[in-house]
Image (cartoon, rainbow, N blue to C red):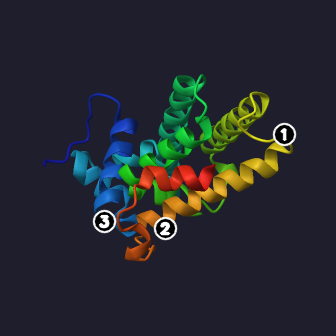
Amino acid sequence: MKSTNYHHGNLKEELIAAGLEILSEQGLDGLSLRNIAKRIGVSHTAPYNHFPDKLSLVAAISTAGHKQLHQILLDTFEKTKSSSNIIFEIAWAYLQFALDNQAIYKLMFSGALEEERDHPEYIEISRKEIALFEEIIVFCQSNGQLPEGGVHKTAIKLWSLTHGFTYLMMENQFPAEYLHGENIREMIKGIIS
């Protein structure tokens, strides 16, 4: 693809999308501003108009992932408010997001951002995700789906169970006999219940 100095459209969004593609294909080591510029056919200096360094790009990609996950969880919550299995449906949506977007999910929870406070959009969406999770817990406590008690402790418990199960699934860490003949949806339902 020929590199140019002029670009039509939303370059920042295209850079993030190209970064996601490279991240999925090559991992974090293959992610560079130069590789992304080459992928979308702009000069190797063009990305620097939006991202001063690789870490800023990583923050933008991670932020995009958190925004997507937040929207999925919000939509799931809205659809299941009349259900008796809200927490399970949230956990299932979380697992599906992770399995469908493994590279970005791993980046989102990798600790690659050394100074998170330097990336206000990342901080903002992280806080929104936590606030949504707490809202879901309070809602479930109010209708008897979860026991009354400390929201933070319940959040830690449920997130740890879901996140841990998700990572073990992604990395194929369960022994084969643990999963043989098992319905994964039913397994996570049993864990969350």
* Residue for badge 1: 148
Q: Nearer the viewer, residue 57 or 154?
A: 154
Asked if labels 2 and 3 touch by Cβ distance under 8 angstroms, the answer is: no
Which amino acid does the dot numbered 1 rest on? Glu
Asked if labels 1 and 3 touch by Cβ distance under 8 angstroms, the answer is: no
Q: Residue furthest front?
A: 181
Residue drawn 19% across and 47% down? 3
Residue drawn 70% across and 50% down? 117
Which structural element holds mark 3?
Answer: helix
* Residue 61 locus on image (x, y percent): 46, 48
Q: CA distance from mark 3 to mark 1?
A: 45 Å
Is 137 on the left-hand or right-hand side of 107? Answer: right
Seen in the picture, residue 182 relative to 126 is either above or below; the reply is below
Q: Nearer the viewer, residue 13 or 64?
A: 64
Foreground mark, 3 or 1?
1
Circle 3 packing at 10 Å, graded few (<14), some (14-19), many (20+), is few
Q: Which is nearer the N-term, disc 3 or disc 1?
A: 3
Is 161 on the left-hand or right-hand side of 141? Answer: left
Which amino acid does the dot numbered 3 rest on? Gln
* Residue for badge 3: 26
Q: Nearer the viewer, residue 106 or 58?
A: 106
Quarter-of-image position of residue 74: top right
* Residue 21 locus on image (x, y percent): 30, 52
* Residue for badge 2: 168
Q: Which is nearer the N-term, disc 2 or disc 1?
A: 1
Which structural element holds mark 2?
Answer: helix
* Residue 160 visible in the snapshot: yes
Foreground mark, 2 or 1?
1
Q: CA distance from mark 2 to mark 1?
A: 29 Å
Which structural element holds mark 1?
Answer: loop
Asked if labels 1 and 2 touch by Cβ distance under 8 angstroms, the answer is: no
Circle 1 packing at 10 Å, graded few (<14), some (14-19), many (20+), is some
